Image (spheres, grey):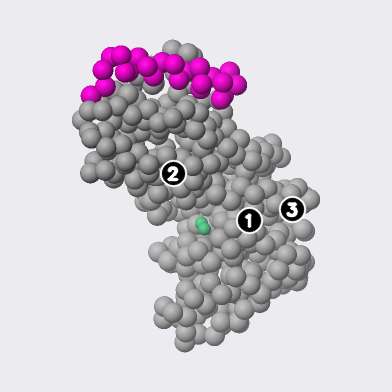
């Protein structure tokens, strides 16, 4: 039994097998965290993904007969957290679903259209500042639109000084331990970084608003819906500081070169760029999309102030691996960065337009025109890339 505080239990599911979360690689698995608050009106905060239902129920039954649950709080409609509410309602006939206005709309769309229209759905819709009296505790709600869905909200227990912010501050990390300090803050921060880059990055402005509201709360614990709980004052301060930094699109003075190659010409350019940047003692990373994972590349991009994107041209287009990556990157919009594009082509440079427009759409400011070389670059052409180092230094203020 995972008791995280008097009368508050973790009743989630540990997903040891998860390796891919809609395109985001999760080599460390994940957890879906549900929390049972045993007050006069027993309250379940979030549920789990559909295949974690039996496990969640087993954990709940050790503590209470599920029929006694009076509220199920759905902080977020996405089915990794709300996927088993329909099943739970069959066991908790008196339970009311507490959610945001958008949450109610979303849950109806998900469940009433998928075979759960035979049970009664009793909603209690809440807004920011609303209070839910469950006995000793008066739970409060904070709507967090677009962190990371329109329906997202956080639940706060002032009596416990615990924030349940759902996906915010989460990490995809499976562990038998429940707390960051048990596993190690560096590990948790690394997973939180990848999580932010791949899930939260487009919503920096909204995250900053949430951080403002969170700054007014006394926090003894932050209990996210994935991964480990932040509970020491130091760890709580660290994750909040990191969120503030990421939300402001801050990055390090380092370079990432992301590319794919067809007949090794773009690779030659990438290696030359790497060599000259490294020689200038600027931290640089080389990512070949043929062998690297999109979600790791995006995490590296979030860390780097300079983003260099390259592709060979195939039938007037960038390579499919690069095209797919650009689609992903345009959705995540890593703003406030510098960069440029490069690559090898056969007879037309038209395909590079996609690279250039993707950079622009992401808010990556070009420091030079695209560096494109026909068929196989000569030694002289490769040497011409050396002059870009000065532009990189200037952009990074080195
Ligand atoms: Fe989500
Ligand atoms: Fe989630």
**Residue drawn at (37%, 30%) of the image:** 342
Q: Is residue 396 magenta?
A: yes
Q: Is residue 91 left or right of residue 6?
A: left
**Residue drawn at (42%, 39%) of the image:** 356
Using the image as rendered, state which of residue 30 and residue 365 is in the foreground. Answer: 365
**Residue drawn at (46%, 47%) of the image:** 330
Looking at the image, residue 331 lies above or below residue 386 = below
Q: Badge 3 is on which residue?
A: 213
Query: Which stretch is magenta?
Result: 376-398
Q: Tell me the quadrant of the picture where the C terminus can be found.
A: top right
Tell me residue 369's x, y (percent).
Answer: 44, 30
Tell me residue 145's x, y (percent).
Answer: 63, 60
Q: Badge 2 is on which residue?
A: 358
Q: Earlier in the sequence, mark 2 or mark 3?
A: 3
Tell me residue 125's x, y (percent).
Answer: 66, 75
The secondary structure type at the circle numbered 1 is: strand
The secondary structure type at the circle numbered 2 is: helix
Q: Is residue 279 visible?
A: yes
**What secondary structure is the magenta-colored segment mainly?**
helix
Q: Which mark is residue 165?
A: 1
Cβ of mark 3 under 8 Å from ligand 1: the answer is no
């Amino acid at each position: 039994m995972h008791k995280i505080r008097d009368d508050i239990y973790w009743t989630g599911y540990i997903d040891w097998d998860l390796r891919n979360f809609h395109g985001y690689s999760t080599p460390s698995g994940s957890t879906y965290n549900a929390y049972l608050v045993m007050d006069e009106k027993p309250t379940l905060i979030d549920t789990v993904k559909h295949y974690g239902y039996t496990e969640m129920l087993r954990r709940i039954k050790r503590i209470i007969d599920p029929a006694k649950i009076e509220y199920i709080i759905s902080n977020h409609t996405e089915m990794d957290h709300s996927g088993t509410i329909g099943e739970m309602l069959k066991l908790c006939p008196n339970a009311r679903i507490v959610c945001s206005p958008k949450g109610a709309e979303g849950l109806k769309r998900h469940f009433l259209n998928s075979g759960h229209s035979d049970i009664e759905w009793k909603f209690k819709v809440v807004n920011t500042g609303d209070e839910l009296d469950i006995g000793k505790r008066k739970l409060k709600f904070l709507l967090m639109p677009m962190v990371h869905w329109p329906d997202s909200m956080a639940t706060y227990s002032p009596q416990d000084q615990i924030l349940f912010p759902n996906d915010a501050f989460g990490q995809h990390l499976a562990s038998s331990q429940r707390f960051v300090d048990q596993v190690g803050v560096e590990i948790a921060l690394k997973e939180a970084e990848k999580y932010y880059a791949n899930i939260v990055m487009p919503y920096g402005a909204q995250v900053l608003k949430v951080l403002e509201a969170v700054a007014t709360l006394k926090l003894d614990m932050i209990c996210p819906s994935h991964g480990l709980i932040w509970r020491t004052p130091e760890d709580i301060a660290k994750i909040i500081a990191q969120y503030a930094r990421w939300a402001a699109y801050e990055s390090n003075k380092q370079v990432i070169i992301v590319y794919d190659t067809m007949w090794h010409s773009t690779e030659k350019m990438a290696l030359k760029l790497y060599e000259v940047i490294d020689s200038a003692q600027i931290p640089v990373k080389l990512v070949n999309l043929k062998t690297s994972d999109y979600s790791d590349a995006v995490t590296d991009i979030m860390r780097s102030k300079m983003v260099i994107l390259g592709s060979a041209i195939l039938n007037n287009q960038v390579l499919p691996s690069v095209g797919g990556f650009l689609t992903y990157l345009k959705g995540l919009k890593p703003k406030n960065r510098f960069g440029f594009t490069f690559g090898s082509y056969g007879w037309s440079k038209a395909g590079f337009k996609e690279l250039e427009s993707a950079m622009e759409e992401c808010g990556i400011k070009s420091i030079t025109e695209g560096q494109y070389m026909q068929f196989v670059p000569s030694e002289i052409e490769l040497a011409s890339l050396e002059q870009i180092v000065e532009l990189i230094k200037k952009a990074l203020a080195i």
